[in-house]
Image (spheres, helix red, strand yellow):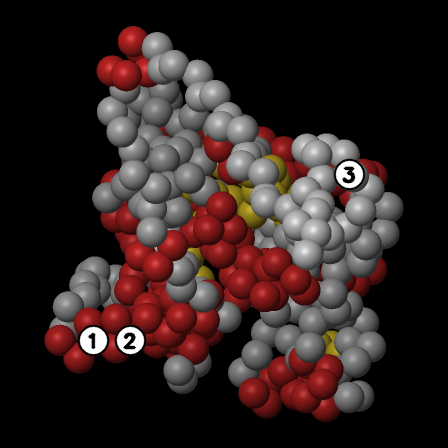
Amino acid sequence: MDPVAGARVIPLHGADRNQSSPSRPRRPRPVPHPTPTAEELQQPLTVAPDPQDATPEPAEWEQRLGGLLNFVRRRIAGDYEVDEFGFDPDLTDNILMPPLKPLYEKWFRVETTGMHNIPTEGGALLVANHSGTLPLDATMTAFAVANEHPGKRHLRMLGADLVFKTPLLGALARKSGQTLACNPDAERLLRSGEVVGVWPEGFKGIGKPFKDRYKLQRFGRGGFVSAALNTGVPIIPVSIVGAEEIYPMIGDIKALARLFGFPYFPVTPTFPLLGPLGAIPLPSKWYIEFGEPIQTDNFGDNAADDPMLVFNLTDQVRETIQQTLYRLLTQRRNVFLG
C-alpha cells in the first residue's frame, strides 16, 4: 500500500484564506491607559451612588396629604397659636389660602409689580382701590403678599362692620387676620410690626356702577393717614386693575338691599338671571402694582393732629393710585387677555 495515498494534505499558513473554515477568534488588543498624574492620585476617591438607594421625590399630592395630616395632628394636640385679634396663621396657611391658588394663578392670572416696596420686616400700611361688587380684590392682594413677597408676610386687612356681623364669615375673617377698620386696632397692628391693608373707598368703591369703573371715590376722612403718622410706618399705594370687570354692576335693587341689610343688591349681566351660576366671576386679567412707599416718620410726634397734613397726604395717596390706574389701563389691550 502506498503511504502517500492516505496522507492528509495540510494547507500552508494563509494559503487558502477565501475558503470557509473554522478559525480561532482573535484576541483583542489591550487598550493603553494613560498614567495618572500626581495631582490626580492625591484627589479623594468618589463612590457612585447606588440607584437602588436613591429616594424618589414625593409627588405633589403626597406633599399636600402629608401637610394636611400634620395640620390635623397639630390641631388635635393644640400645637398652634392665635394672637389677640383671633388670627390663626396655621389655619390660614394650610386651609384658607390654598383654595385661592387656582383662582389667583389660573382664573385671574394675576401679575404683580413692585413687591419689593413692601418691607421684609416692620410695619407698613397698604392702601388700595376697591372694586368688583364682591371684595375679591382684597383677597387676591392678601394672597399675593403671602405667596410672592420674599418674606411671605401676612396682610392684616381692615374690614367693615358688616363683615364681622355676618355669621361664619366674621369668624373666618378673624381667623384669617382681619380686624375692624378703626384706628386703635390699626395702630396696634402697625406698632407690632404687621403689614396692614386698607381699602378707604369702602362700599362706595366696591358697589359703584360699572360705568364709573376705575374712578376712585372719596377716601374717607383720612383715618388711615393718621394711623400711619402715629406709628411712623410707610404708606404703600396699591393699584389693582382687573377687579372691576369680574361682576359688572349694571343695577342696584335697593328694596332687596334694605330687606337683607346690605349696602346694595347688585344686578350684573349674569346675576340674578343665572341664579347661582351668576356668582362665578368673569375671568378678567389682573394687574396689581405696589407703589413707592410714602414715608411718614419724618413729620414729628404730633403730625396726626395737623388736619392740613392729613388731608394733603390722603390726597397724595389717592392721586398716586388714580394715576397708576390710568397708566395700567393704557397698557392693557384686552380685558380678558391682558
Q: What's the residue at 45%, 42% (across, down)?
A: 149
Q: Amino acid at mark 1?
A: Arg
> Would you say residue 198 is visible in this rendering?
no
Q: Amino acid at mark 3?
A: Arg
From mark 3 to mark 2, how far is it between C-alphas? 78 Å
Percent x, y of residue 259: 59, 89
Q: Which residue is more in the foreground, 36 or 45?
A: 36
Q: Nearer the viewer, mark 1 or mark 3?
A: 3
According to the picture, the residue beneath numbered tag 1 turns out to be 73
Relative to 178, does residue 259 appear above or below in the rendering? Answer: below
Relative to 321, 236 lies left or right:
left
Q: Earlier in the sequence, mark 3 or mark 2?
A: 3
The local crowd at label 2, few if under 14, some if 14 to 19, many if 20 or more residues have their Cα within 10 Å, is few
Q: What's the residue at 29%, 48% (across, down)?
A: 189
- Image quarter of residue 84: bottom left
Q: Are marks 2 and 1 in contact (CB under 8 Å)?
A: yes
Percent x, y of residue 126: 47, 43
According to the picture, the residue beneath numbered tag 2 turns out to be 69
Q: Secondary structure at mark 2?
A: helix
Percent x, y of residue 320: 63, 33
Q: Which residue is more in the foreground, 285 or 272?
A: 285
According to the picture, the residue beneath numbered tag 3 turns out to be 17
Q: What's the residue at 25%, 24% (across, down)?
A: 44
Q: Earlier in the sequence, mark 1 or mark 3?
A: 3
Q: Secondary structure at mark 1?
A: helix
Q: What's the residue at 66%, 62% (across, down)?
A: 106
Relative to 108, does residue 124 appear above or below in the rendering? Answer: above
